Amino acid sequence: MTRRITIDPITRLEGHGKIEIFLDDHGDVERAILQVPELRGFEQFAVGRPVEEMPRITPRICGVCPTAHHMAATKAADAVFGVEPTSTARKIRELIYNAFMMEDHTLHFFFLGGPDFVVGPQAPAAERNILGVIGKVGLEIGGKVIRIRADVREIMAYLAGKAIHPVCGLPGGVAKGLDEEHRVTFLKTAKDAVEFAEFALQIFADVVLKNQAYVDIVVGEAYKIKTYYMGMVNDRNQVEFYDGDLRVVDPDGREFAKFKPADYLEHIAEHVEPWTYVKFPFLKKVGWKGFVEGNDSGVYRVAPLARLNAAEGMQTPRAQKHYDHMYAVLGGKPVHNTLAFHWARLIEALQAAESMVALLEDAEITGTDLRRIPTRIPTEGVGIVEAPRGVLIHHYKTDERGLITAANLIVATIGNAAAINMSIEKAAKAFIKGGQVSEGLLNMAEMAFRPYDPCHGCGTHAWPGAMPLTINIYNRSGERIRQLRRS
Amino acid sequence: MSQEHFEPKLVGFLCTWCSYTGADLAGTARMMYAPNVRIIRIMCSGRVDPQFVMKAFQEGADGVFISGCHPGDCHYKDGNTKTLRRHRLLSRVLEQFGIERERFRLEWVSASEGTKFRQVCNEFTEQIRTLGPLNFNGNGGGPHERR
Amino acid sequence: MSDAKPKVAFYWCSSCGGCEESIVDLAEDILKVVAAVDIVFWPVALDFKKKDVEAMPDKSIAVSFINGAIRMSEQEEMAHLLRRKSQLVVAHGACAHLGGIPGLANFWNKSTIFRTAYHTTVSTDNPAGLEPQPKTSLDGHELTLPEFWDTVYPLDAIIDVDYYLPGCAPHRDLILNAVTAILEGKLPPKGAVLAPNKSCCDDCDRNETKPEKMTIKEIKRPYEVLLDPKTCFLAQGVICMGPATRSGCGERCIEGNMPCRGCMGPTDQVYDQGAKFLSAFASILDASEEKDVERLVDSIVDPAGTFYRFSLPSSILKRKKLEAVR
Ligand code: SF4
Ligand code: SF4
Ligand code: SF4
Ligand code: FES
């Protein structure tokens, strides 16, 4: 008897992502998919808009990572006009961007992904949320998390107008500069951020690495898929968030490709399926072979672990130490264990915090040369940044007045869309056998896709870290025969 | 829809000092002109809020025109220059909403130009007749277009 | 959780998640809010399901905050359900209030949006010409997706709304004030926008730099000039929606040295924000000869997309004429 299992993270009718699992006649998993039930059409309604407004329009794709869209759009606008930002402007953008990376990554760890580890995978649902984490780690640490996040977001709000939906980026620079007084305040915040990121890594070491049960989960086969990895690197092949080339490594960790953002179309294409509103990016030179792992499949992954795999190291000393340590513990590069995304995320938060300190100690950051006025006739441009959730691509074509004639956006979460489906299917296979659906399925499903932090604001908008789950099991005639709920 | 049976619905906002008097003259002189225009009298063309024009289209007008005193003759000095700027800007906005420029006119008609008023009405009616019905509201704009 | 506390629900429709984030951004204050109310539904953060809401008696939720515009079938269903179960419904954020930026999609229709998303975008590889379907079959299993509409709607086009919490995303003070007002029962008349009824200009630091008689000789796009951080944007020839926009946002964009784009919507007296701005803006253009007027007007490159940046679906015209969409 074929059965269908629906895992409805926010129930079907609320519509921000649902998992369907189909069992075969033996009750084993035949297929598992994640459906994304929403589309908003930014690529179309960008048409006709002035390119310099895109940095203020596209952040509304996602209010969780608006800064990533803002910067990708600003860089694409630079490219459309063929203008480079001034040196101070570039540093201000990088400061804002690193601040954003730092706070977003820590938010994810403590509030969203963290509950798996901090509260524990077996904890009741009522505790697996922001408030639960605060309850568990104590109000003091909870307060610390809230405070550092608020302080770091203050840097973004000051320079970019608003932390949610920033306004600072213009082709050729930024709208607002930094004065000495604020530099001093923000430098203190940045130093606190470094300590905080170290502290988060310490919690990870204490809670996860010292607990063999967790380590077994992290390295277990159920949460492992072998794919290509894509990430941005600087000229020394180190992890880079704001600007650099894209590097792809194959499932064995060898460099497969390295390219300039402007050449992305030679390397990336998107596949369409009729059962979901998202598209599935893949490596063009390998080809779309379906939702399968390995060297012959064009499926690649993005986001923290992918960036660490695709690079040869971190840019900052403290982060580098943790990088070496992670690969030593997990048995060398590349690491295919999906749950290691959490670890990689914290290492990146540390690099971001260290970079903030370096930028704020740079005398040029308080410079007043903030803009280079574009003079060329606008045409076409690509802007790519590393969003917290992976490679984010904005590509605009304009007419000679700089009005968009065509836009192409490949949003970060979607970079992992195929891999998320595969991770879910793999984990489902491990937890459902012979028609027996183990109670662990709920945890499984959450833990299999939460590491990607699939902020479906860029697709749906679920914060899956806090996603409640119900699993409905239907028999062939569509009657519900069983329901599992986390509570 | 068959064009023969289409009677354009037009709205004209006329300034009371010049254009409305001009229209009156056309009326008292028993000039024949297309009866398609619903006339709304206003103190000055400069008082036509863009919202009035939009509302007219939204409620079914196929064409709207504003008529004021000739440049320099506005009784409120520069009401009609404001109207000119608004008209040009509003035309572009309406165009972005899918309402052709031809459907929104600006005319200067003085109190003595009854003939001109007649001519404007006739011309505009014919132009809109050729363009066909706008039917803005029936074509989206409300939550009813959902299928 | 005690039953004595008022029950509160949060829900999102076609939104970006920024309005949810604005609640997280209350930082320490979120704990106070949480202590004072009983959150019965918040899909983003807590494990309560639609059928839990269905099981509640009608009107048992004191207030539902709904963010996001409405553009898909299931969002409409959820809006109706929450309306039935709630005493008060607050449209939270610009998308629910006015349609928001996703409402710019009203310049197009479903088939154009699909054509671009699934066919013509340069990285799309779709040899079979597939598009997402409300019903599909995958290896013999039927799958469903909610239906995508031609038009984006603000919340009050779908259900009755009691209050509006404006902004994209709303300022923390407005959220706190709204919550406090609800908890203390000190509410303004139904239909009120929970923000001051004055314009951004009234609260803007740059207002005093406005010349006595404001005129614009040349319109500048923000990237074309070095923006003076102290002078009124309009006085610099840069379009700023401040005069037609409600205050209460802290004028944060202007603090960031960028002109206002109108996310707070219009003040009480104004129905159509874009038309109001158009009218005000046209009167300060410094041109009276037809030729000059046209030249100046033509230099505004995207008037409708600028004046209606956040409010297209709630404007008088609401969307582009459907059959005129290419
Ligand atoms: S109002 Fe703004 S922040 Fe809120 S959901 Fe809409 S786009 Fe996002
Ligand atoms: S137009 Fe803009 S910059 Fe000028 S006073 Fe108003 S809000 Fe401030
Ligand atoms: S300045 Fe304008 S666009 Fe910016 S937050 Fe305020 S109302 Fe919104
Ligand atoms: S009075 Fe006739 S246009 Fe002003």
Image: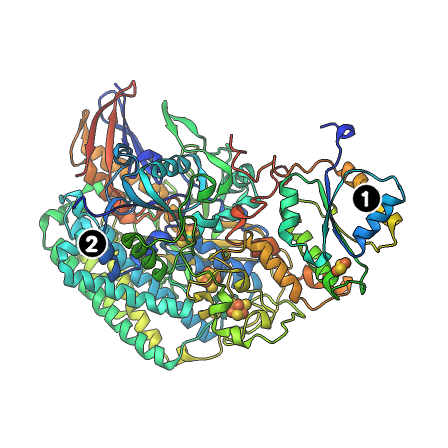
Label for residue C35?
2
Q: Which residue is mark 1?
A: B121
Q: Is residue A462 left or right of residue B74?
A: left
Quadrant for residue A429, please give it.
top left
Which residue does the image show at 51% across and 67% down from the upper left?
C201
**Mark 2 belongs to which subunit?**
C
Number of numbered discs: 2
Which residue does the image show at 25% across and 55% down from the upper left?
C33
Q: Are marks 1 and 2 in contact (CB under 8 Å)?
A: no
Circles 1 and 2 on the same chain: no
Residue A383, how many percent across, how many down?
A: 48, 58
Q: Is mark 1 within 8 Å of ligand 4?
A: no
Element at label 2: helix
Q: Is residue A215 left or right of residue C269?
A: left
Residue C17, how many percent across, how many down?
A: 37, 50
Q: How is the image coloured?
A: rainbow
Which residue does the image show at 20% across and 54% down from the upper left?
C35
Front residue of A299/C157: it is: C157
Estimate the spatial distance between the alpha carbons at disc 1 and disc 2, rounded to whole Å.
68 Å
Residue C166, how many percent across, how many down?
A: 42, 55
Q: Is mark 2 within 8 Å of ligand 1?
A: no
- What amino acid is found at the position of numbered circle 2 in the picture? Ala
Front residue of A248/B35: it is: B35
Element at label 1: helix
- What amino acid is found at the position of numbered circle 1 in the picture? Cys
